[in-house]
Amino acid sequence: MSPKQLDRITIEAGKCGGRACIREYRIRVADILGLLGAGASHAEILEDFPFLEEEDILATLEYATIQADHSILIAA
């Protein structure tokens, strides 16, 4: 994935509580992930949200992957 695709994910302090959104719209990354987790297809999401593009969904998945893969520090 190119860094350009991750530019589709935006975070603004005054929008959606500062949570990650898609291209400055008021639809959160978590909303799209929730739809995918509930079994919605990409086509269904794009039909329900016509302002979104396939690349937005792919960027959402990549962003979630990066967020899930963080280091865990254990005190010795």
Image: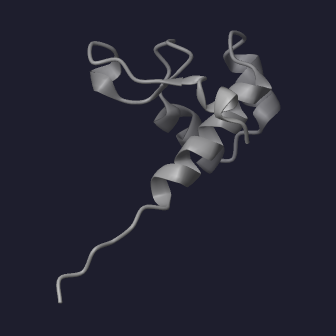
Q: Looking at this view, is 48 or 68 the one in front?
A: 68
Q: Position of residue 10 (x, y in %)?
A: 47, 22
Q: Residue at x 27, y 18 (%)?
A: 13
> Of all residues shown, which one is farthest toward the bottom?
76
Q: Residue at x 28, y 74 (%)?
A: 73
Q: Residue at x 58, y 34 (%)?
A: 32
Q: Look at the image and tell me whether residue 74 can be seen.
A: yes
Q: Is residue 33 above or below residue 66?
A: above
Q: Is residue 75 above or below residue 26?
A: below
What colouring style does the render use? one colour
Q: Residue at x 69, y 47 (%)?
A: 39
76 to the left or right of 41: left
Q: Look at the image and tell me whether residue 35 can be seen.
A: no
Picture quadrant where residue 22 is located? top right
Q: Is residue 44 above or below residue 30?
A: above
27 to the left or right of 59: left
> Of all residues shown, which one is farthest toward the right?
43
Q: Position of residue 76 (x, y in %)?
A: 17, 90
Q: Position of residue 56 (x, y in %)?
A: 68, 27
29 to the left or right of 74: right
- Label count reads 0
> Of all residues shown, which one is farthest toward the left?
75
Q: Position of residue 35 (x, y in %)?
A: 60, 38
Quadrant in which the N terminus is drawn: top right
